[in-house]
Amino acid sequence: MSDLDAYVRQRKKVDPEFAHDFESGYQKFKIGAMLKLAREDAGLTQEQVAQKLKTKKSAISRIENHAEDIPLSTLETYARAFGKTLKLELLDSPRA
């Protein structure tokens, strides 16, 4: 375990607000990272996806880098732009 992992684990134990904010922020980051990886795996640039979605490259960048409050319809359209489907899953909340 890295020093950072140890710090995060310890901080979560003593600071419930940090634990909640950390998990929430991580999930938002993870969504954007997953979208970017899927686009790259499809061999497409942000510009190419933007053209398929009839939007600007900056909009695609925002989706990938600031994946918060994105409507499901936008995520579905984004995924379809390179032949993917969106799968939504509800999981138990992680414990601190």
Image: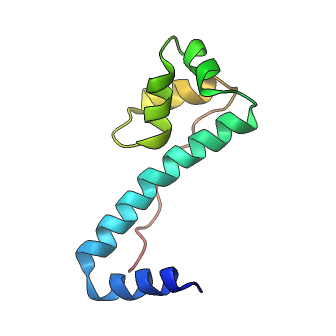
Asked whether residue 21 is in view, the answer is yes
In the image, 93 versus 78, the foreground residue is 78
In the image, 51 versus 70, the foreground residue is 51
Horizontal and vertical percent position of residue 23: 39, 66
Residue drawn at point x = 50 percent, y = 39 percent: 64
Lateral position of residue 62 relative to residue 38, left or right: left
Horizontal and vertical percent position of residue 57: 51, 22
In the image, 71 versus 56, the foreground residue is 56
Question: Colour scheme used in the picture?
Answer: rainbow
- Quadrant containing the N terminus is bottom right
Residue 96 position (above or below residue 35): below
In the image, 61 versus 79, the foreground residue is 61
Residue drawn at point x = 53 percent, y = 23 percent: 77
Horizontal and vertical percent position of residue 36: 60, 40
Q: Quadrant of residue 92?
A: bottom left
Residue drawn at point x = 56 percent, y = 48 percent: 33
Asked whether residue 89 is in view, the answer is no
Horizontal and vertical percent position of residue 44: 70, 27
Residue drawn at point x = 40 percent, y = 68 percent: 93
Q: Quadrant of residue 74?
A: top left
Residue 71 position (above or below residue 57): below
- Quadrant containing the C terminus is bottom left
Lateral position of residue 69 relative to residue 43, left or right: left
Instruction: Count the labels in the image.
Output: 0
